Amino acid sequence: MNLASPHVVNVKDLRRLARRRLPDAVFDYLDGAADDEVTLKDSERAFKEVIFKPRFAVATPACDLGVTVLGHKLALPFMLAPIGYSRLMHPRGELAASKAAGRNGTAYILSTMSGHKIEDVKAQSAGPTFYQLYLAGGRGAAEGAIARAKAAGYKALFVTIDTPVAGNRERDARNGMKELMGPNWLKKMKYVPNILTHPYWLAAFIADGMTRPFPNIVVPGSGPLQAVDVAAALESAQVSWTDLKWIRELWSGPIVIKGVMTVDDAKRSVDAVAQGIVVSTHAGRQLDGVAGSLRVLPGIVEAVGDKTEVLFDGGIRRGADVVKAIALGAKAVLLGRGYAYGMAAAGDAGIERAIEIFRADIIRTLKLLGCSSIAQVDSSYIALRLGFRVD
Ligand SMILES: Cc1cc2nc3c(=O)[nH]c(=O)nc-3n(C[C@H](O)[C@H](O)[C@H](O)COP(=O)(O)O)c2cc1C
């Protein structure tokens, strides 16, 4: 697959290649969101309502993209977000993401819904690796995963709080995700013709052993949780503030609360001794109708930005989006689909290409803004269209 320019110049091109390689069920799982996908669309639209205010005739010889997150120096202002079922998109999935993050001097956050083992993912990267926690499989399973993450050298826990149940992802229902992940071959038959039209994905999937249990959700007494569709897997995943106290006792390192969308939850996170929060709508896949996450970012930064590290994700498709989120107060951002389309299209090479595109975009944007490092970016470089903020 030719990933070089002019075949691939932006994330949309990687999305197009991912769509070509993946069966509909897998592509829509990656691309889709909940209900009418209003939040997903607003997440992308919100960036267009942030207007740059450049300073021209300023020398910007080198652009330093370094940031510090949870005490770790990262060479890039973006990390790679947890993406469940990455191994379904590409056999190397989480291994490829971890390796690419490490090679490029940034961090990878491994999802609980990983197809690869905690230890194997960490072994791909000498850089900081963080573990995203759901309580899928109950507290016993979570306790095992936390202990393994600690032993393997993961540096922080990202606890996702926005998933009391899975959102209503209608594309998944239509594409038979539940049937395809289930054991009954008769029920799968209806969806097989579309899969057969994607032979490269299918051959890789078969060679990889097809669906397998979640290696990091090991329920005491009954072993690894069987691979099921996302709604079933998340049934027991709900995290409460009481659970967070329990998690705090098990994990002495930094805890980051992922999925904060209000000042109230941001303050509760600080009270729960979170070293960081991720302002996030979970890619618009949970409660549809919440604002694009960029709209709530300034209010949350004003409320807790001096007490905790405010990270951000949602709708980032260009390097300029990364710069805008940082101008609005995020310390760093997480790329979700921005790298996952690359992973789905071409594994390791696809993620490398995504990172390369974002890095070049950010440097160009900074130079055009007249700003010589990401650390200098602040709200003086932007203006907001009327009605942008949601507080
Ligand atoms: C296919 C897919 C799977 C995801 N799986 C998880 C997950 O397992 N845990 C989690 O905390 N967030 C998960 N997320 C949310 C991402 O971590 C991140 O918040 C989101 O993708 C950012 O939005 P963006 O895709 O618009 O960049 C997932 C997102 C996608 C698109």
Image (cartoon, helix red, strand yellow):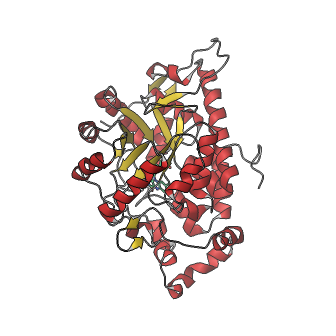
The mark tally for this picture is 0
Q: Nearer the viewer, residue 82 or 366?
A: 82
In what quadrant of the picture does the C terminus appear? Answer: top left
Q: Residue furthest front?
A: 151
Direction from residue 12 to residue 68 in the image, left or right: left
Give the quarter of the image for residue 292.
Answer: top left
Direction from residue 17 to residue 98 in the image, left or right: left
- Does residue 387 show up? no
Q: Is residue 195 above or below residue 329?
A: below
Residue 378: % across, % down? 46, 22
Q: Is residue 332 above or below residue 232?
A: above
Instruction: Give the residue at x 35% y 66%.
Output: 137
Instruction: Give the residue at x 68% y 45%.
Output: 353
Residue 365: % across, % down? 61, 27
Q: Is residue 236 above or below residue 53?
A: below
Instruction: Give the residue at x 43% y 64%.
Output: 169
Instruction: Give the residue at x 70% y 50%.
Output: 349
Residue 366: % across, % down? 60, 24
Give the quarter of the image for residue 4.
Answer: top right
Q: Nearer the viewer, residue 264 or 241?
A: 241
